[in-house]
């Protein structure tokens, strides 16, 4: 397996775990959100959770080969 593939897999896995945690936090915040500002914060947190998967996979693709060689 190439270092790039290992980086994508590891980054994607870490991103998915982080996504689950951030979405759980967003769900707890949404339950107590009363104002529009708090609801907007929840939606931004959900967006960041989705972007985490992509960002960590890309970072893994570039960083893991640098450390493996």
Image (cartoon, grey):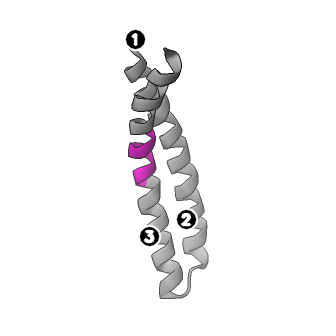
Secondary structure at badge 1 equals loop
Secondary structure at badge 3 equals helix
Pointer 3 with pointer 1, Cβ within 8 A: no
Q: Residue at x 57, y 57 (%)?
A: 24
Q: Is residue 37 covered in magenta?
A: no
Q: Earlier in the sequence, mark 2 or mark 3?
A: 2
**Which residue lies under the disc numbered 1?**
1
Q: Earlier in the sequence, mark 3 or mark 1?
A: 1
Front label number (2 vs 1): 1
Q: Which mark is residue 27?
A: 2
Q: Residue at x 46, y 41 (%)?
A: 56
Residue 54: percent from the left, percent from the top? 38, 44
* The quarter of the displayed image where residue 30 is located: bottom right
Compute the Cα span from label 2 to label 1. Answer: 37 Å
Q: Taking 44 as reference, is 19 above or below it?
A: above
Front label number (2 vs 3): 3
Q: Which mark is residue 9?
A: none
Residue 55: percent from the left, percent from the top? 41, 45
Q: Nearer the viewer, residue 7 or 9?
A: 7
Q: Is residue 51 covered in magenta?
A: yes
Range shown magenta = 50-56
Q: Main secondary structure of the magenta part?
A: helix
Compute the Cα span from label 2 to label 3. Answer: 10 Å
Q: Taking 36 as reference, is 43 above or below it?
A: above
Q: Taking 38 as reference, is 65 above or below it?
A: above
Residue 13: percent from the left, percent from the top? 49, 34
Q: Nearer the viewer, residue 10 or 35?
A: 10
**Which residue lies under the disc numbered 3?**
43
């Amino acid at each position: 397996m190439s270092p790039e593939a290992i980086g994508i897999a590891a980054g994607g896995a870490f991103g998915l775990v982080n996504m689950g945690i951030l979405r759980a936090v967003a769900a707890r915040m949404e339950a107590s959100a009363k104002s529009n500002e708090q609801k907007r914060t929840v939606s931004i947190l959900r967006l960041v959770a989705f972007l985490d998967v992509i960002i960590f996979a890309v970072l893994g693709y570039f960083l893991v080969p640098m450390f493996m060689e």
